[in-house]
């Protein structure tokens, strides 16, 4: 396909292609051809005609729940996490078998792929995280382990947040690893908070705050605690002392504190679902998120298909990480390539979840129409 370039800056009468992190913009309102100074972009698709990860009907593993060999990534591969390890990018992607029809009706497992250039992938033959006959089967089976996000501490502990889906209640769960292959499950992120008050809360999409340090993205504490943004119907927050047990942030009424919500008439009129790990910058904390558009006859943005998922950005204040100080009015990334508009989600999706830093570039990995994995790349100095 043709190379797509998403963001241009017009200054005076000249036309200048700018690199990520160096944009000049005097107003917060974002047009289709500009980004404010604080935003991260431009993200460009590589000049390729296919996604970077696609379903594979040849790989099998023995499923401990079904007690048989399963083609675990036969139907769809999408919604990936990403991180850099030992000079390579590792992508942890959601894979679905062919056990049923319909979104959320199959079993999801987490696969592993790695790449030296961020595009050409070498994949493991078996998943690295999946429902098993263990103490967590009641929260993970039969739907599985979905939509991972991953980040790492300074001392090399990898933390994965994923949706445990038992086909009753989707809930945030946590796992940790030292090698990205062998994972220890810890159960529900909010299971112990406030004496179990939020144990059965619908929850997903955790974006922990990180920073670029010594050439890699690492987890950063805010005001002495780990901080995540999470949620899909509204952006909420949670804090932790140990990365495993999390407490949702509450408002003065002792309810969940909602930091941002969908907006009528915009690309995020239906959902504001948190994306990859948030990035601490000198301008503020930048949260990339997935905005779902409403239908055109209701409250959606007529410039994008109804039901489509496009990518937006929030800016949170460094001194008050619960305060939104910037927000894009138009998406910085949206479905354009054919494989982003054809799949099991026919309205079109670029569902961003993975952000990796390698050799001065940011690699943004995303789900294409709930069926394949794509990547877009940004120079980031």
Image (cartoon, rainbow, N blue to C red):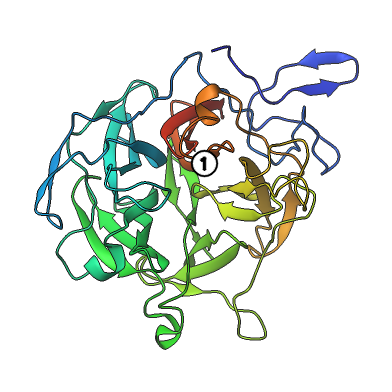
Residue 87 in sight in this render: no
| Quadrant (top left/top right/bottom left/bottom right) for the C terminus | top right
Instruction: Name the one closer to the observer, 206 or 374.
Output: 374
Q: Who's the residue at 40% across and 84% down the image?
A: 196
Q: Which residue is mark 1?
A: 352
On the rendered structure, is 238 left or right of 69?
right
Q: Is residue 292 above or below residue 20?
A: below
The number of numbered discs placed on residues in the rendered structure image is 1
Counting other residues with Cα less than 10 Å from the Cα at mark 1, is it few (<14), some (14-19), or many (20 or more)? many
Residue 190: give x, y in percent of width and height.
41, 73
| Residue lying farthest to the front in this orientation | 101
Instruction: Name the one closer to the observer, 39 or 201.
Output: 201
Residue 89: give x, y in percent of width and height.
35, 32
The image quarter containing residue 127 is top left
Q: Who's the residue at 36% across and 63% down the image?
A: 167
On the rendered structure, is 141 left or right of 248?
left
The image quarter containing residue 141 is bottom left
The image quarter containing residue 348 is top right
Q: Is residue 23 above or below residue 318?
A: above
On the rendered structure, is 109 left or right of 48?
left
Q: Who's the residue at 56% across and 25% down the image?
A: 379
| Residue lying farthest to the right in this orientation | 12
Residue 96: give x, y in percent of width and height.
31, 43
Residue 354: give x, y in percent of width and height.
45, 41
| Quadrant (top left/top right/bottom left/bottom right) for the N terminus | top right
* Mark 1: secondary structure: strand
Residue 162 in sight in this render: yes
Q: Is residue 192 above or below residue 68?
A: below
On the rendered structure, is 91 left or right of 333?
left
Q: Is residue 335 above or below residue 318?
A: above
């Amino acid at each position: 396909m043709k190379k797509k370039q998403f963001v241009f800056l017009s200054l005076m009468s000249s036309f200048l292609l700018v690199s990520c992190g160096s944009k000049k913009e005097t107003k917060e309102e974002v047009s289709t051809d500009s980004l404010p100074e604080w935003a991260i972009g431009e993200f460009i698709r590589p000049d390729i005609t296919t996604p970077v990860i696609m379903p594979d009907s040849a790989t099998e593993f023995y499923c401990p729940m079904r007690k048989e060999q399963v083609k675990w990534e036969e139907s769809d591969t999408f919604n990936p996490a990403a991180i850099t390890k030992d000079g390579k990018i590792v992508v942890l992607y959601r894979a679905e078998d062919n056990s049923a029809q319909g979104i959320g009706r199959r079993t999801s497992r987490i696969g592993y792929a790695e790449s030296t250039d961020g595009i050409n992938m070498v994949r493991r033959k078996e998943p690295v995280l999946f429902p098993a006959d263990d103490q967590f089967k009641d929260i993970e089976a039969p739907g599985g382990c979905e939509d991972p996000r991953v980040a790492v501490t300074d001392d090399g502990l990898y933390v994965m947040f994923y949706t445990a889906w038992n086909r009753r209640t989707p809930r945030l769960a946590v796992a940790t690893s030292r090698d990205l292959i062998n994972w220890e499950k810890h159960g529900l992120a909010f299971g112990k908070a406030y004496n179990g008050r939020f144990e059965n809360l619908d929850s997903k999409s955790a974006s922990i705050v990180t920073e670029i340090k010594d050439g890699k993205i690492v987890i950063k504490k805010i005001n002495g605690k780990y901080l995540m943004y999470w949620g899909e119907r509204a952006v909420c927050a949670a804090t932790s002392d140990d990365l495993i047990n999390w407490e949702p942030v509450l408002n003065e009424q002792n309810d969940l504190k909602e930091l941002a919500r969908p907006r009528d008439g915009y690309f995020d009129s239906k959902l504001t679902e948190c994306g990859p790990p948030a990035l601490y910058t000198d301008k503020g904390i930048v949260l990339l998120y997935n905005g779902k558009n409403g239908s055109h006859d209701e409250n959606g943005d007529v410039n994008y298909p109804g039901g489509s998922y496009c990518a937006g950005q929030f800016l949170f204040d460094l001194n008050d990480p619960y305060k939104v100080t910037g927000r894009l009015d138009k998406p910085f990334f949206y479905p354009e390539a054919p494989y982003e508009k054809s799949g099991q989600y026919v309205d079109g999706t670029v569902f961003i979840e993975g952000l990796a830093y390698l050799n001065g570039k940011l690699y943004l990995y995303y789900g294409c129409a709930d069926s394949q994995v794509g990547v877009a790349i940004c120079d980031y100095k």
